[in-house]
């Protein structure tokens, strides 16, 4: 194998072998741009070293060969005493990895060559400063000496001299400092700072190899799912200096960074910073202030003009925004690095469409230049980051957005205050279904307990409402209606708070908010065609059109009411993939379900069902109307029972109090007995879903009748209802068969009495491992499957979806067991593999089986790609995530 590539030998497509930095340095070299000559040691060499503990046998000779060539080209030898060639040694993996070892500059300086450098540069101070920097960097990153020791010595030197900044130290001071630094190295490592330049270089290369295995690098890779065996390349590049002062015959120098267009807006122009008479690290050290890049034109016009030409070359060549590091040495421009640059979400969209217009990329490529996470970011109103704000705590960023309002501590107050026109933030320890009205009324929700799939988080996301949950350091006292921060600040009911659902930050007082033009556009309040339309909106509009043109996955909404359905439709939903009927029974109607569950006699039960039927039917009529012509999947009741029963503790207390007053309440007593009987330790694995339908006679029949009658009524009104009935939590085909028989009977009855055909389909959720494993059998009785990946993740991992994110997930994430919660992004290897096999088994039984997903993953970018790949027909997600799902479905197909 060949382990070393000259910059003239590589190219940008060799990132696997040369790392990102090396590949791009080679690419620029071959474009004829002024890159200081050098070479790259491959990731393959690193891999051999990491596997065997020694460099590959051929490496030394290859490095010598390339170093010879470099020395010939430069006309001087590495570390040559009278005129030294100096090099930098820099790591560069395929994926950029912050936290990995950095750079060692000025390799080749020694007690001998520092004198030569001084003579050549005509600048003694510069030479000693360069040597001091080498020992410091080399000591810290190669020899593992505590960097503080060098910093202290530097401070000491300044103190002795009575100056405050480095530049006030003169050549003699710096020479003394070099001595001090060498002493530190000798004392800390037990050997002298190496004077042989080749030894310096080899040790630096080895240190870069070793840096692949630092704890930080390992953790970073595990979290980012970067394979641990890629290795890093090492770039050896001849040094150029921006801090060689001006001489009589040439211009001065400096160093800078530049972007080929504005990384914040995408606009073309001159963007960057320049620091005169300085080296790269000086910018960071903040010794002097940088000037805008445009000022370089006045400082050094020829170099500026050349830089502008190079930037244009790079952008046309990479067909993207590039960022650049450059140095000017005595008037000569050198390119030290380039890469496709990071950008804000808004700029990503604008740049992608600008490049299409410039003919540099096509639409399919434009789709790859943006992503759903960026779109999601653009859809939420944001706090004005320039504004002053007092942060009082931080929780989990559960549902993005920026919300401001008066603190309220119960739903009743939330509703009452919002009715009188107040904006409120509902603050609870955690929420439960009883809080729904309060959540609807509030601008945002803040809880001190619970994770990303806690009730508050899931419901808030569903509503597109800002939510910060699990802010553990905030103590919520709902009785006294106050919140106490860790430093003792108290927020009383009525005090204004601001919560940022994108960062999890909580602020006291009002932080100003900027609305999202992208949402205004999706809502139809802003038109991309208008002359004065926002550039960003125009770009989003075009990218969405590309995505819709190419995607195969259809996108539906999880919506339970006409308002959500209508919004979902505006956002591009092609139907409803999940209407959770239990959401139709919260609030005032909860008691009707309670009556049903606790009914003792057939008559009681039938009366309760009779009351529910017209309400349900009216709900469905509205829903079918809002989604006219599009499919609406209505799921039959699936609540864990306890959500519909009075709280057992509260009720027990009430009964006990009444008894102690010798005034027992017969009703409460009976209720308590019934609640006791139905109480479950593990409600999520208890009497819910299809089990409820099988145990409570008439419940599912009532719901099916409501659906059928609503559909019939829509038909009569010349509508086009397309209802699909879905059975939750099925584990075996037998459950489904029983429910199906009953449902078909009811539907036939409605059809007969109305004299019409309704064409209702009946399918099931696949959300239990057993259902996934027996999907082939279940498909015998199902017209469609919808994967409930929330419950499937819960049951496959054995993770309680309500608890684990707030309890031990942080530890799991920190240990790198996973990089993201499996409730957020589908676990492809585990849960995903069940989805894949169940989809295949279902289709083997029934080739026309319709397949969808309605768990939270349906709106998650990475998961959407997975569902595309396993061949589902649609994903269903909350209304606000529909544009993201459309975009990602397009990206998956493009
Ligand atoms: C699911 O389990 O993925 C699902 C969509 O149902 P729910 O979240 O209502 O349990
Ligand atoms: Mg479920």
Image (cartoon, helix red, strand yellow):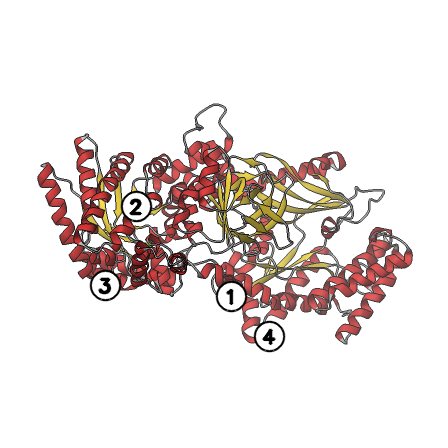
Q: Residue at x 78, y 63 (%)?
A: 150
Q: Are marks 2 and 3 in contact (CB under 8 Å)?
A: no
Q: Label 1 belongs to which residue?
A: 228
- Distance CA(mark 4)–CA(mark 2): 58 Å
Q: Do the residues labelled 1 and 2 touch (CB within 8 Å)?
A: no
* Mark toward the start of the polypeptide (2 vs 3): 2
Q: Do the residues labelled 4 and 1 touch (CB within 8 Å)?
A: no
Nearer to us of marks 3 and 4 is 3
- Distance CA(mark 4)–CA(mark 1): 18 Å
- Distance CA(mark 3)–CA(mark 4): 52 Å
Q: What element carries label 4?
A: loop
Q: What element carries label 2?
A: strand
Q: Is mark 3 on a helix, strand or loop?
A: loop
Confirm whether residue 164 shows in the render.
yes
How many other residues sit within 10 Å of disc 1, few (<14), some (14-19) or many (≥20)? Answer: few
Task: Please say if 135 is above or below 526.
Answer: below
* Mark toward the start of the polypeptide (1 vs 2): 1
- Distance CA(mark 1)–CA(mark 2): 39 Å
The percent coordinates of residue 875 (x first, y second) are: 33, 48
Q: Label 4 belongs to which residue?
A: 54
């Amino acid at each position: 194998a060949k382990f070393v590539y000259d910059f003239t030998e590589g190219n940008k497509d060799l990132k696997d072998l040369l790392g990102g930095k090396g590949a791009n340095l080679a690419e620029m070299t071959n474009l004829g741009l002024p890159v200081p000559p050098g070479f790259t040691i491959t990731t393959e060499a690193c891999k051999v070293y990491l596997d065997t503990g020694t460099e590959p046998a051929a490496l030394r000779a290859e490095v010598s060969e390339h170093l010879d060539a470099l020395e010939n080209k430069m006309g001087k030898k590495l570390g040559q005493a009278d005129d030294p060639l100096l090099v930098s040694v820099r790591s560069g993996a395929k994926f950029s990895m912050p936290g990995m070892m950095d750079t060692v500059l000025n390799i080749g300086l020694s007690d001998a060559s520092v004198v030569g450098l001084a003579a050549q540069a005509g600048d003694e101070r510069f030479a000693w400063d360069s040597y001091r920097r080498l020992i410091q960097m080399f000591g810290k990153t190669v020899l593992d000496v505590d960097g503080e020791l060098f910093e202290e010595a530097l401070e000491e030197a300044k103190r002795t001299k009575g100056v405050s900044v480095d530049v006030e130290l003169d050549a003699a001071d710096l020479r003394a400092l070099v001595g001090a630094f060498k002493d530190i190295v000798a004392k800390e490592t037990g050997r002298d700072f190496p004077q042989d330049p080749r030894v310096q270089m080899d040790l630096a290369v080895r240190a870069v190899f070793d840096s692949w295995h630092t704890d930080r690098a390992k953790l970073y890779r595990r979290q980012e799912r970067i394979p641990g065996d890629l290795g890093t390349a090492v770039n050896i590049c001849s040094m150029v200096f921006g801090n060689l002062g001006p001489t009589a015959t040439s211009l001065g120098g400096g160093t800078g960074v530049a972007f080929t267009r504005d990384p914040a807006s995408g606009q073309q122009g001159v963007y960057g910073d320049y620091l005169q008479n300085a080296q790269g690290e000086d910018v960071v050290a903040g010794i002097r202030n940088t000037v805008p890049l445009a000022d370089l034109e006045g400082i050094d016009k020829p170099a500026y003009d050349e830089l502008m030409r190079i930037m244009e070359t790079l952008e046309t060549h990479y067909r993207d925004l590039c960022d650049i590091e450059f140095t000017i040495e005595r008037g000569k421009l050198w390119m030290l690095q380039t890469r496709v640059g990071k950008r804000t979400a808004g700029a990503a969209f604008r740049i992608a469409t600008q490049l299409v217009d410039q003919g540099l990329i096509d639409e399919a490529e434009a789709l790859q230049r943006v992503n759903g996470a960026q779109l999601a970011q653009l859809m939420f109103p944001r706090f004005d980051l320039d504004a002053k704000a007092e942060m009082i705590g931080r929780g989990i960023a559960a549902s993005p957005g920026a919300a401001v309002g008066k603190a309220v501590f119960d739903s009743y107050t939330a509703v009452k205050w919002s009715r009188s026109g107040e904006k409120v933030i509902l603050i609870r320890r955690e929420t439960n279904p009883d809080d729904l009205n309060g959540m609807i009324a509030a601008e945002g929700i803040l809880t001190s307990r619970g994770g990303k799939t806690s009730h508050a988080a899931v419901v808030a996301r569903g509503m597109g409402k800002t939510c910060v949950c699990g802010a553990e350091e905030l103590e919520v006292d709902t009785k006294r209606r106050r919140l106490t921060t860790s430093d003792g600040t108290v927020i009383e009911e009525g005090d204004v708070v601001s919560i940022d659902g994108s960062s999890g930050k909580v602020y006291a007082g009002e932080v100003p908010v900027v609305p999202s033009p992208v949402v205004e556009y999706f809502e139809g309040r802003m038109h991309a065609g208008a002359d004065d339309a926002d550039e960003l909106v125009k770009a989003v509009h075009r990218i969405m059109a590309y995505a819709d043109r190419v995607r195969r996955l259809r996108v539906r909404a999880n919506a339970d009411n006409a308002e959500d359905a209508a919004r979902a439709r505006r956002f591009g939903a092609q139907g409803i993939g999940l209407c959770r009927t239990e959401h139709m029974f919260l609030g005032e109607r909860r008691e009707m379900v309670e009556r049903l569950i606790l009914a003792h006699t057939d008559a009681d039960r039938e009366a309760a069902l009779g009351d529910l039927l017209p309400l349900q039917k009216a709900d469905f009529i509205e829903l079918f109307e809002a989604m006219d012509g599009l499919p609406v999947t209505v799921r039959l009741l699936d609540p864990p029972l306890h959500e519909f029963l009075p709280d057992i503790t509260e009720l027990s207390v009430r009964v006990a109090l009444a008894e102690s007053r010798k005034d027992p309440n017969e009703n409460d007593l009976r209720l308590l007995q019934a609640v006791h009987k139905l109480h479950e330790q593990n409600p999520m694995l208890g009497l819910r879903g299809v089990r409820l339908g099988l145990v409570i006679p008439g419940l599912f029949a009532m719901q099916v009748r409501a659906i059928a009658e609503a559909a019939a009524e829509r038909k009569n009104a010349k509508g086009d209802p397309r209802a699909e009935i879905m059975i939750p939590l099925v584990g075996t085909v037998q459950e489904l068969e029983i429910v199906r028989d009953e449902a078909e009977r009811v539907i036939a009855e409605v059809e007969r009495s109305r004299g019409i055909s309704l064409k209702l389909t009946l399918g099931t959720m696949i959300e239990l491992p057993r259902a996934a494993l027996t999907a082939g059998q279940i498909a015998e009785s199902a017209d469609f499957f919808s994967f409930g990946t929330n419950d499937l993740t819960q049951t496959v991992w054995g993770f309680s979806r309500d608890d684990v994110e707030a309890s031990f997930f942080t530890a799991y994430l920190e240990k790198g067991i996973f990089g993201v919660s499996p409730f957020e992004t589908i676990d492809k290897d585990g849960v995903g593999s069940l989805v894949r096999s169940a989809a295949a088994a279902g289709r083997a039984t029934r080739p026309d089986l319709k397949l969808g997903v309605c768990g939270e993953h349906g709106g998650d970018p990475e998961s959407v790609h997975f569902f595309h790949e396993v061949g589902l027909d649609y994903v269903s997600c909350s209304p606000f995530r529909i544009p993201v799902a459309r975009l990602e479905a397009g990206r998956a197909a493009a």
